[in-house]
Image (spheres, rainbow, N blue to C red):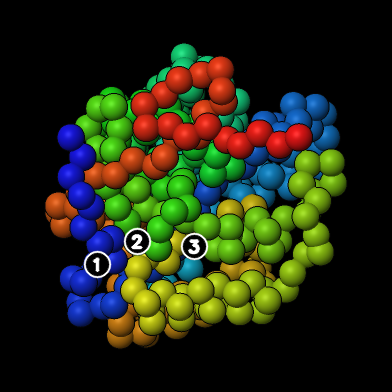
Amino acid sequence: MIEEARACTFADWPESANCAAAFTFDVDGESAALAADPNAARSLSIMTHQSYGPTVGVRRLLDVLERTRTRSTFFIPGYTADLHPSVVRDIAAAGHEVAHHGYHHVRPTGLSNAEQAEQLDRGIDALERLTGERPQGYRAPMWDLSWEMPTLLAERGFAYDSSLMDDDSPYVLATDSVPIVEIPIHWALDDWEQYCFLPGVSELGPIQTPAHAIELWSAELEGVRRFGGCWVLTNHPFLSGRPGRAASLERFITTAHEMPDVWVASLGEIAGLARSAHLAARRPISIVPDDQTASASVRPPRFG
């Protein structure tokens, strides 16, 4: 039985902080483009655009994190790990958390339960083989978490997920197994919407300047500082690893560290704190079609 949940905003962040901030990175590499269009493999230009992340961007960002003394979380698809094993080892050797981002970077919502489990297990094996440790965190490719995935994660011993968007603070997510911690994200705190332009794959455009991106992210951080909560930025090395963007990000990280009311941490550290707070578990309301049944579900309205 799920107990009534306590308020989610923490009053006891470490170091007398009013909020937490995490700088996280999704090392998609070639997998994101291939998941969007398998024919992208025929384009040398697209593949090199994506490989810039693991071959150049990660190294530059690791240097940024070292200079700013920041511990981060890197979400890595198993396919990227198999294609660029030395990069995964470098991230782990630098003391950062290596977390799960699927295997082929395909959306879990488009897969059967068995296929979702296979993507999880292949990704776990790839990361554990390179780091010697099973990943504790998960982020769904394209932030498209399925209703089944939290239970699949819990059954495999994951401590937390970071894919949902229904709060400003970490909370405990109920599953059909043991609960896991959820660390929410949202689209405004992602460099994909700011920087990604890849003809035939992702054409959001126009490409923004780093100043525009930092202005948006800073406004969100100021809001979290005022109201409390957890600010989670998602960057991609093939985007934010470019020179001008990396330089701006370094200045922004330095500024965040100088804020006395902000605790800068990895997602693993934040998840550990949330678990120790003994928050009651909660479960999102399930919306299902009329021809299906589910407990605690609500059917969508019909129009026309």
Residue 140 pos. (x, y %) = 50, 39
Q: Quadrant of residue 258?
A: bottom left
Query: Above or below — where is 36 with respect to 17?
Result: above
Q: What element carries label 1?
A: loop
Foreground tag (2 vs 3): 2
Residue 28 pos. (x, y %): 58, 43
Identify the image quadrant of residue 20: bottom left
- Residue 172 is marked as none
The kind of residue tagged 1 is Phe
- Extreme front residue here? 304
Query: In which quadrant will I find the C terminus?
Result: top right
Mark 2: secondary structure: loop
Nearer to me, 211 or 114: 114
* Residue for badge 2: 169
Residue 55 drawn above or below residue 16? above
Query: Which residue occupies the foreground of this view, 126 or 213?
Result: 213
Distance Cα–Cα, label 1 vs label 3: 19 Å
Q: Which badge, 1 or 3, is on the more N-terminal residue?
A: 1
Asked if residue 56 lies left or right of residue 123, the reply is right
The numbered dot on residue 233 is 3
Amino acid type for the residue under numbered disc 2: Ser
**Marks 1 and 2, Cα distance to the nearest angstrom?**
7 Å
Residue linked to disc 1: 10
Residue 197 visible within the image: yes
Q: In this view, does 116 lie to the left or right of 192?
A: left
* Nearer-N-terminus badge (2/3): 2
